[in-house]
Amino acid sequence: MLDASVLPPLLLTFKVATLATALAALPAVCLARLAQVRDFPGRDVVDAVLTLPMVLPPTVLGYYIIVVLGRRGIIGSWLWDAFGVTIMFTWQGAVVAAAVVAFPLVYRSSRAAFEGVDGNLENAARTLGASETAIFLRVSFPLALRGVVAGVVLALARAMGEFGATLMVAGNLPGKTQTLSLAVYSATQAGNDALANELVLLISVACVALLVFVARIVKPKA
């Protein structure tokens, strides 16, 4: 039976990961499609910037988020002065941090999926008078759907395990911003090995289940 102290970080982790994935998915898919079909100056640089969260240390990402959305940040100062709103040390901040970390997983997977679509099918739709929007919705996206879904599920798994950026932006406040990964850190620091083991097992099982799901999605049909 689960320890009662496990439930709050467990529920918060699912809440944060789900919202973060939803926040990252739409712009990631749209930008992946744009990068795949449009050839513009500096496209490789833009592609590298969009992929950057995948390779940067999470603490660096956390610092960038603070610079942009912190109370003295580029956008955060305006939000605070105009509306009295801040994401710092809130669960919403954890959502933003997880979304930034998860974004490139959706972006790279979606772009690869769109690049794998047969261009002859898209050209055939153009000759029939279909608009680019119709081609995307009726041809490109359905054919790339498996790859897009795989990227979204991987992003969900990554968001569930996010630690560094979340710690910097949202802090580690029990019952407020403490996700499973932060709870593992706190339990380890406190020497509570039993609780740490339980938390690690939970998040490991969840992530393995998601990875198995992805493997089944991307497995070629017989």
Image (cartoon, helix red, strand yellow):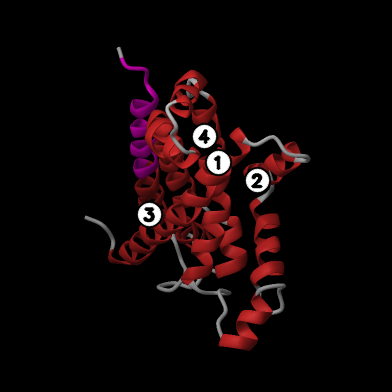
Chain-order first, disc 3 or disc 1: 1
Q: CA distance from mark 1 to mark 4?
A: 6 Å
Asked if residue 98 is positioned above or below residue 216 in the image, the reply reads: below
Whether label 3 touches label 2, CB < 8 Å: no
Secondary structure, magenta segment, majority class: helix
Q: In x, y percent, where is residue 204?
A: 39, 42
Instruction: Look at mark 4 in the image and give the residue it sits on.
Output: 109
In the image, 113: left or right of 81?
left
Instruction: Look at mark 2 in the image and give the residue it sits on.
Output: 50
Q: CA distance from mark 3 to mark 2?
A: 39 Å
Quarter of the image where one finds residue 183? bottom left
Instruction: Look at mark 1 in the image and give the residue it sits on.
Output: 107
Instruction: Look at mark 3 in the image and give the residue it sits on.
Output: 194
Mark 4: secondary structure:
helix
Whether label 1 touches label 4, CB < 8 Å: yes
Q: Residue at x 70, y 61 (%)?
A: 64
Q: Nearer the viewer, mark 3 or mark 2?
A: 2
Q: Nearer the viewer, mark 3 or mark 1?
A: 1
Q: Which residues are magenta?
A: 205-221
Q: Amino acid at mark 3?
A: Ala
Asked if residue 221 is positioned above or below residue 157 in the image, the reply reads: above
Q: Alpha-carbon neighbours of circle 3 within 10 Å: few (<14), some, or many (≥20)?
A: few
Chain-order first, disc 1 or disc 2: 2
Quarter of the image where one finds residue 81? bottom right
Q: Residue at x 65, y 46 (%)?
A: 50
Q: In x, y percent, where is residue 23?
A: 47, 57
Q: Amino acid at mark 4?
A: Ser
Mark 1: secondary structure:
helix
